[in-house]
Image (cartoon, rainbow, N blue to C red):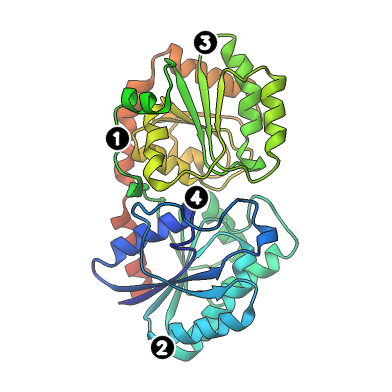
Amino acid sequence: MKIVIVSTAYPLRGGIAHYIALLYKHLSKDHDVEIVTFSRQYPAFLFPGKSQEEQGGGGTVVPGEQLIDSINPFTWYTAAKAIARKKPDLLIFKYWLPFFGPCFGTISRLVKRWTGAKTLFICDNIIPHEKRPGDTAFTRYAFGSVDSFIVQSRAVERDLISFHPGARHRFVPHPVYEIFGVGMAKADARKKLGLNDERIILFFGYIRRYKGLHILLDAMPKILERIKVKLMVVGEFYGDEELYRRQIADNRLQMDVMVHAEYVPNEEVGLYFSACDVVVLPYVSATQSGIVQIAYQFDKPVIATDVGGLSEVVLHEKTGFIVPPNQPAALANAVVRFYEEKRENDFVASVRDEKKNYSWETLVEAIEMLGKA
């Protein structure tokens, strides 16, 4: 098939761009694939981070045309014309935010009208964690010309069916992020980071309120009452960093929490995952999280909250622990149990087995089935 992917992609950064790089790699084995991405993804005033562009290369460098300005409808038309000239059989959109609904919906309608191409949306969310006016209308417009959907958690599947009854779709678990390599020995990673602590837990990724870092920081004193542990917080703040800094100070955690408040280049991601014992996702709300797939790539167990589809991927008492959200005491107890019961080796073995279920080949097969039908 001739396939065009419309999404965030290199040279833009972040988990979705990484996902698209891997999708391109695996689809290109048997299909003619091209990528169309953004010349401007977000207006500066809507983007809370420091940069929208990738700082490193790693495995994310893929060919793509930067044709779309998310807030300039004229570029939606010209991008659609450029895509139509490629004569695609299938147009794939990675959908995660209603903000892109008008843009994606317009491009989809025009390309279908001019070429008859089928359209497929791979949905991270239906309605996002942080809701805004217009979400429902924008999403409804985006979905109005879609032939089929792929969802990557049962939680998103339920949202899709509720929002768009009768939607033709397939559920395929989110594949692992193999783009970051295979990691290194824990002792070597800790030496590079200047860490000597016996126990290290990791919170990784963009720091937004719904991801619950504040819950984990409230849990830390309860953990430290029982065991010694260091928390690594690694990621760029998408909000008031000072709020978290004050919380660390108020809880007297300055010696127990290491904060690396920067976007991590792809080639350094494995360093932080390799150094930790377990990854902690204290989310307040979620549909799914690519952080679990990164953790699994590095054979790391996960302690996560029971929100969205996290409990579908983090198997309680097998690849980690699932705890109730918004409960620092429950989160603290899970971390302590992990160490006191010496669960790491058993969890790691289960992670190595479980991650076999999260393959790119399964996703490609689903795309081929939906695209040809």
Residue labelled with disc 3: 227
> Which sits in the foreground, 73 or 109?
73
The vertical placement of 188 against 24, above or below, is above
Could you tell which of marks 2 and 1 lies nearer the N-terminus?
2
Residue 214 location (% of width, % of height): 66, 31
**Left or right, residue 272 beside residue 306:** left
Question: Separation of disc 1 and disc 4 at Cα?
Answer: 22 Å
Q: Are marks 2 and 1 in contact (CB under 8 Å)?
A: no
Where disc 1 sits, the SS reads: helix
Question: Separation of disc 2 and disc 4 at Cα?
Answer: 36 Å
Residue labelled with disc 2: 85
The vertical placement of 275 against 11, above or below, is above
Could you tell which of marks 4 and 3 lies nearer the N-terminus?
4
Q: Amino acid at mark 4?
A: Arg
Crowding at dot 4, Cα within 10 Å, few <14 / some 14-19 / many 20+, comes out as: some
Q: Quadrant of residue 271?
A: top left
Residue labelled with disc 4: 154
Could you tell which of marks 3 and 1 lies nearer the N-terminus?
3
Question: Separation of disc 3 and disc 1 at Cα?
Answer: 27 Å
Residue 225 location (% of width, % of height): 59, 9
Residue labelled with disc 1: 352
Question: Separation of disc 4 and disc 3 at Cα?
Answer: 36 Å
Q: Amino acid at mark 2?
A: Arg
Residue 345 location (% of width, % of height): 32, 21
> Which sits in the foreground, 278 or 121?
278
Q: Nearer the viewer, mark 1 or mark 4?
A: 1
